[in-house]
Image: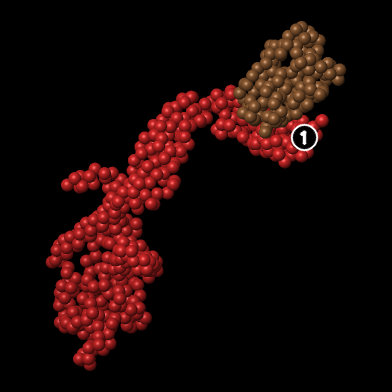
């Protein structure tokens, strides 16, 4: 319940500030599909805590978690997107996240362990499987 | 008996060729240089070499070192001191003559021409000294002779001793059908009892006859008398027939020609047999000596590969060969002489298993393979494909407390990689080498290498081997 509240706050903040800057690869404005627009995607230390997102590309295992924040606009119907987490080239987890019109922010979070150190990426796909963005980061000491 | 049988079982056709070829070379060397001092010196060097080996065997350090030095220098001395003899042999015969030329000494010395020339000189009162060598080598006994190699004719003999000729005072040396030297100085006899009528010419003729088996014809300038010196004494010659008789007897012509040829053939047969035995002994010392074992780590080479496929994986890149052979052969092995080659002519895309057989292994002659580890090698072939893949920085360590790495850009962001289809299907990113975070305090850039995993992947020539990683650092918000 508390996490949902955090996500909602993040969505509201994002909606209020408009489009941010996409991290790493892909531009939000270029990922339009049938009205769905990815306006922001970034890796965060503390999505929803003390502000919208503590954006970073390296994450210490001492942080305990890492989050992937994506913000969509021009959503016509209830739908969903996928956050696929890869450690190097191996799929670690794939999360299905619901989105609702007209604008929505989603966060997926992964707990960090010692064994997770190394290069990672999160691929963001829409419901049809189309790749919208790739976010790259590293888990470090 | 078993040992003899074992010896012949282990002999290859290459060994037989090896022994016969070297026996022939040794035999020809003997034939070409026999009668010269070269062979005697070489025998001395061989003795030195055996003495050195013996000294080594007995553990005589200084003696072996000394003999080794002598042997090394002696080889050089042969070339320097006997350069004339070597040159004479090489110049006198063409390649066919050296390898297969007639080895009998010319016996057709034209006795009639020599006799006629002697009496012509006698008639004209022209002094002459003509030396017909026997079996002894006169090389060390003659001085200042001039090489001539002219075919014997009456006119030429007379011209050699003609008073105005600069070499007329010396002796002419006859060999076969040629005058090989003119103007030669003969050793003078030291006998005190020689009659006073004998001058320097007669004393020289007798001097050579005393120290060799040569026959010397002397024509007196004063009296025109023809005299022979042979066996350390003068022999009177009454007329040209008597001279011819003496010459023929000396040269052994006509009557005992067959016997001499037989003797010569027997001599050469013995020399050939000794050559074969010597080379056989040397060959056995090399190949049948005490067995030594050695292990070699050899890279595996793959040949006859379809250019349309590439090797994307092997179970091993090297194999260990356990080799054995005579210690001298084992110690002289060079790395480039040991090869393991696998023929991929029949390989297919995917995993191929090969057993390393003797046919796959190249070794120096006389060296055997006892064992191969591993005996089997698997090779994975794939159709090569080239893809452009994104590059990601691989960070390690920990940023200083209070700092956050906000963003990273890699330039170029993509590189083109070539690898097997199966490998490339599972590959979506190329990573950099590990980049430490610990010393980073502010935004900056680093140039780093790319890491290819698996290593069989290759970066295309147009793509860089290194990339620049730029990073933005900010202070953590409290």
Q: Quadrant of residue B100?
A: bottom left
Q: For mark 1, name the chain.
A: B
Q: Toward the viewer: B299 or B99?
A: B299
Q: Quadrant of residue B295?
A: top left
Q: Which chain is brown?
A: A
| Residue B454: image location, x then y, percent | 56, 31
- Residue closest to the far front: A2
Q: Which chain is red?
A: B
Q: Quadrant of the C terminus of chain B?
A: top right
- Residue closest to the far top: A77
Reading the image, the residue beneath label 1 is B403
* Residue B388 seen by the camera: no
Left or right of B447 on screen, residue B243: left
| Residue A132: image location, x then y, percent | 72, 18
Q: Secondary structure at mark 1?
A: strand
Residue ID at (60%, 33%) = B452
Residue ID at (62%, 30%) = B417
Q: Residues within 10 Å of mark 1 (few under 14, many from 20)?
A: some
In this rendering, the answer to whether B42 lies above or below B430 is below
In this rendering, the answer to whether B337 lies above or below B268 is above
Q: Toward the viewer: B383 or B444?
A: B444
| Residue B307: image location, x then y, percent | 51, 30
Residue ID at (29%, 81%) = B186
Residue ID at (36%, 44%) = B323
- Residue closest to the far bottom: B196
* Residue B6 seen by the camera: yes
Left or right of B444 on screen, residue B203: left
Q: Quadrant of residue B211?
A: bottom left
| Residue B248: image location, x then y, percent | 17, 72
């Amino acid at each position: 319940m508390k996490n949902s509240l955090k996500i909602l706050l993040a969505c509201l903040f994002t909606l209020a500030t408009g489009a941010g800057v996409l991290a790493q690869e892909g531009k939000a404005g270029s990922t339009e599909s049938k009205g769905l627009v990815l306006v922001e995607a970034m890796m965060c230390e503390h999505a929803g805590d003390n502000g919208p997102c503590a954006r970073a590309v390296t994450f210490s295992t001492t942080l305990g978690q890492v989050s992937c924040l994506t913000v969509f606009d021009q959503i016509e119907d209830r739908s969903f997107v996928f956050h696929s987490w890869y450690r190097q080239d191996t799929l670690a987890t794939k999360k299905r996240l619901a989105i609702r019109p007209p604008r929505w922010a989603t966060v997926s979070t992964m707990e960090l362990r010692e064994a997770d150190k190394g290069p990672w990426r999160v691929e963001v796909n829409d419901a049809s499987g189309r790749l919208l963005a790739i976010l790259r980061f590293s888990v470090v000491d | 008996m078993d040992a003899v049988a074992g010896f012949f079982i282990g002999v290859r056709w290459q060994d037989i060729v090896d022994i016969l070829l070297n026996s022939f070379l040794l035999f020809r060397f003997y034939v070409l240089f026999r009668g010269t001092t070269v062979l005697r010196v070489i025998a001395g060097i061989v003795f030195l070499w055996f003495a050195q080996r013996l000294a080594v065997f007995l553990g005589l350090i200084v003696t072996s070192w000394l003999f080794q030095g002598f042997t090394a220098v002696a080889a050089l001395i042969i070339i320097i001191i006997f350069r004339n003899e070597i040159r004479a042999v090489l110049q006198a015969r063409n390649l066919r003559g050296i390898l297969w030329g007639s080895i009998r000494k010319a016996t057709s010395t034209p006795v009639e021409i020599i006799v006629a020339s002697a009496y012509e000189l006698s008639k004209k009162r022209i002094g002459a000294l003509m030396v017909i060598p026997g079996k002894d080598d006169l090389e060390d006994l003659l001085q200042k002779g001039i090489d001539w190699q002219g075919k014997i004719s009456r006119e030429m003999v007379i011209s050699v001793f003609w008073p105005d000729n600069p070499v007329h005072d010396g002796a002419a040396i006859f060999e076969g059908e040629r005058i090989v030297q003119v103007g030669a100085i003969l050793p003078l006899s030291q006998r005190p009892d020689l009659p006073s009528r004998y001058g320097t010419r007669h004393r020289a003729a007798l001097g050579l006859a005393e120290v060799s088996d040569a026959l010397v014809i002397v024509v007196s300038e004063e009296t025109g008398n023809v005299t022979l010196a042979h066996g350390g004494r003068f022999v009177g010659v009454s007329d040209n027939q008597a001279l011819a008789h003496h010459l023929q007897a000396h040269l052994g012509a006509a009557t005992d020609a067959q016997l001499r040829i037989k003797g010569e053939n027997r001599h050469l047969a013995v020399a050939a047999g000794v050559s074969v035995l010597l080379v056989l002994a040397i060959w056995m010392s090399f190949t049948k000596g005490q067995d030594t074992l050695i292990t070699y780590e050899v890279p595996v080479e793959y040949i006859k590969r379809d250019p349309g496929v590439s090797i994307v994986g092997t179970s091993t890149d090297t194999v260990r060969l356990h080799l054995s052979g005579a210690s001298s052969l084992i110690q002289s092995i060079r790395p480039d002489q040991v090869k393991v080659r696998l023929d991929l002519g029949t390989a297919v895309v995917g995993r191929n298993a090969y057993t390393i057989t003797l046919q796959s292994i190249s070794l120096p002659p006389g060296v055997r393979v006892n064992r191969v580890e591993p005996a089997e090698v698997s090779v994975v072939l794939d159709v090569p494909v080239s893809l452009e893949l994104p590059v990601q920085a691989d960070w390690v360590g920990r940023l200083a407390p209070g700092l956050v790495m906000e963003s990273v850009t890699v330039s170029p962001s993509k590189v083109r990689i070539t690898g097997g289809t199966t490998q490339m299907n599972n590959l979506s990113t190329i990573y950099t080498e590990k980049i430490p975070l610990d010393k980073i305090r502010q935004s900056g850039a680093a140039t780093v290498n790319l890491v290819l995993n698996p290593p069989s992947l290759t970066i295309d020539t147009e793509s860089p081997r290194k990339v620049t990683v730029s990073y933005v650092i900010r202070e953590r918000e409290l």
